[in-house]
Image (spheres, grey):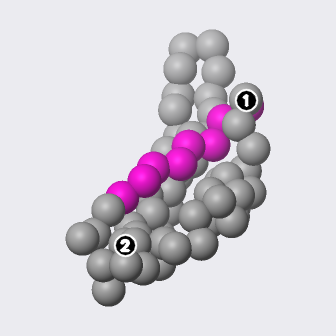
């Protein structure tokens, strides 16, 4: 079965790379099928920032 997990990067969370690597280290039985990266610019009245996220598509090793 294909599953997904989303990771978001902001001021309070570490980089997406670190989050994904830590998650993979905790789940060695997962096989990453694909990673979809996305960046958006949020332009507010007072400020502008870049929001990044990643959608990880994976499956469990047992279900191969």
24 part of magenta stretch: no
Residue at the extreme top of the image, as rendered: 46
Q: Main secondary structure of the magenta part?
A: strand
Looking at the picture, tell me which residue is in the foreground, 38 or 28: 28
Which is nearer the N-term, disc 1 or disc 2?
1
Disc 2 residue crowd, few under 14, some 14–19, many 20+, Cα 10 Å: some
Front disc: 1 or 2 = 2
* Residue at numbered disc 1: 12
Disc 1 residue crowd, few under 14, some 14–19, many 20+, Cα 10 Å: few
Say if 27 sits above or below 45 in the image: below
At horizontal 37% and vertical 72% (from top left) the residue drawn is 59
- Look at the image and tell me in which quarter the N terminus lies: bottom left
Residue at the extreme bottom of the image, as rendered: 64
At horizontal 73% and vertical 29% (from top left) the residue drawn is 12
Looking at the picture, tell me which residue is in the foreground, 39 or 14: 14
Q: Which residues are magenta?
A: 4-11
* Residue at numbered disc 2: 59
At horizontal 63% and vertical 13% (from top left) the residue drawn is 46
**Position of residue 3 in the picture relative to residue 51 (left or right):** left
Q: Quadrant of residue 47?
A: top right
Label 1: which secondary element: loop
């Amino acid at each position: 079965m294909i599953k997904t997990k989303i990771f978001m990067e902001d001021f309070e969370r570490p980089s997406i790379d670190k989050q994904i690597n830590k998650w993979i280290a905790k789940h060695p039985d997962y096989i990453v099928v694909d990673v979809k990266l996305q960046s958006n610019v949020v332009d507010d009245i007072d400020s502008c920032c870049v929001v990044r996220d990643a959608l990880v598509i994976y499956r469990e090793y047992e279900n191969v």
